[in-house]
Amino acid sequence: MTLFKTLNTRLSDYFTEKRLKNLFMFLFVLSLIPIIALCFFDYATGDDLLVGSVVMEARRNGLGFLGTTKAIFTSIYQYWLTFEGTWFSEFLWRLEPSVWGERVYTVTGFIGLLALTVGPFLLLKELLVELLKLSKNSFLIFYFAFEIILIQYMPSTKGGLYFYCGMIMYTLSFGMACTAISWGLRFIRTGKKHLLIFSSIVLTLVGGMGYPDIMFAGVTAFFIIVNAFVVDKDRRNQALLLIIPLVLLAIGFGVSAIAPGNSVRGGESFSWSIGEVFMTLLLSLKNGIVQIPQYLISVRPLFIYYIGLILFAWARIDTSKSLLKLDHPIIVTIELYLISSSTYAPEMFVREGVDAGISGGVYNTYYLVFLMCTSLALIYVVGFIKARVADRCKGVCNPSKISYCGKIPYMAFVILFILVFGRHLVSNMFDYKCITFASSGRLADFVAQMEERNAILNDPTITDPVLPLMNDDQGPYMHMAILEGEGDYTNYATALFYGKNSVIGMNRDEWYERYEELYGQK
């Protein structure tokens, strides 16, 4: 015991709160380097080109600002009638970066990273610093660890970061939802009306974006209103005013939901009925439970993260300072479970009927919301237990004594866990995918082939280009391959974007034999 106590004391003396914050900040920044590096080699594809063709065609026809704006809204309305109703995503899609220049598309990944970092930061800071009263250094330790797990183990890198349409629909809408919710919480706390206005505007826009994020924002806002109204009598007026952005979110969603095009994308089975709604609720609640062990299996570092979070929360939460009433762990846990489960509702409503398939961005939203809700549930429950123990035996609640009991065994557990699972902890990391894609030479091949392709497509003298085929598996990038024949979707979208009569693909070896001299490529 003396050895453990000595080791614990030395570890505590060396790993001060500030040093831990700096360590996790360094690890977080380091983890972003491979992801950011690949942002610079990203290219538009498939869906990007189709929706961007509206602006490109308007520019080729010299329509000017007003004419281009009219073309954008006409296209959105046509999609609302014939394909899907997510009106704000549709608007942003038509402004996809490559319409301003092919290499401008590289901003896609940076927008996604901002959404994944800024939105959660604002929401978690409001909850943990302003309400739970964690110190800023303690909060940043948690935030950087949270962000590493959030970004590195996001299920779909293609749908979440490097693909503009998927990034807008799900990643950006998640960040916007977190930001709007944080402003709503701040409004309740401070009463500053501009926060209510900002929250209302952003939630209205979220109502026209990805359906899982609409559910996340709506159910979260509802529980915030109810809890604030019941618990905090002094701020009931602010809580009731938060109904305004919730109603605006519902209106934005309503515009999306009534779109005739939803029945096209949703397939023949798409319909509204009481039975469908009831079944959707049951399946969503089921998935909220079923996904927990699945995430623990597929994202094994969650074991390390959750156990570390429990020890961290116990040591860092000062229950005497908290503005949150840590009295209802069961109710709060159920609410967070319902928030996480609600994100499954859109997929469960249409189930297998989506003709266009379920985007990888949908599964990103499931994971992002799950991680946030489970993290907050653990922090709240630990705070509740600590408050009760403190009432009965203050000495037991001394953080140094708890650290003495848990710090050394936890470090031993982490080391053993790493030794046992080894590469299984990193094989599904975002960084691993980026590094292996680049180090294998596939990134260089991808860039060379895209430059080769774009040189042909940008040649105004070539009206019916024949392009060498490319593999559709391009690591972390979304790449919708051009195929042989004119009827393929990506062929059509590419021709529309670049103003060509047609675009077809050809086996690369055959292409070099037939077109190398004509196109001057190899």
Image: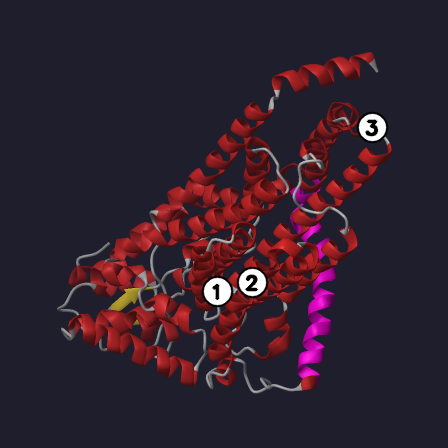
Q: Where is residue 178 in the image (x, y as percent from the top left)?
A: 52, 55
Q: Is residue 65 left or right of residue 485?
A: left
Residue in the picture at 67% in, 19% down = 12
Q: Give the alpha-carbon distance from disc 2 to disc 1, as whole Å.
A: 8 Å
Q: Give the alpha-carbon distance from disc 2 to disc 3, as whole Å.
A: 39 Å
Labelled pair 1, 3 in contact (Cβ < 8 Å): no
Kindly identify which numbered label has been placed on residue 217. Answer: 2
Crowd tier of the residue under label 3, counting other residues whose Cα lies within 10 Å: few below 14, some 14–19, many 20 or above: few
Q: Is residue 11 above or below residue 99?
A: above
User: Does the magenta portion include 131?
Assistant: no
Amino acid type indicated by mark 3: Val
List the residue tagged with mark 3.
396
Kindly identify which numbered label has been placed on residue 203. Answer: 1
Q: In this view, does 174 lie above or below 404?
A: below
Labelled pair 2, 1 in contact (Cβ < 8 Å): yes
Q: Give the range drawn in magenta.
A: 275-303
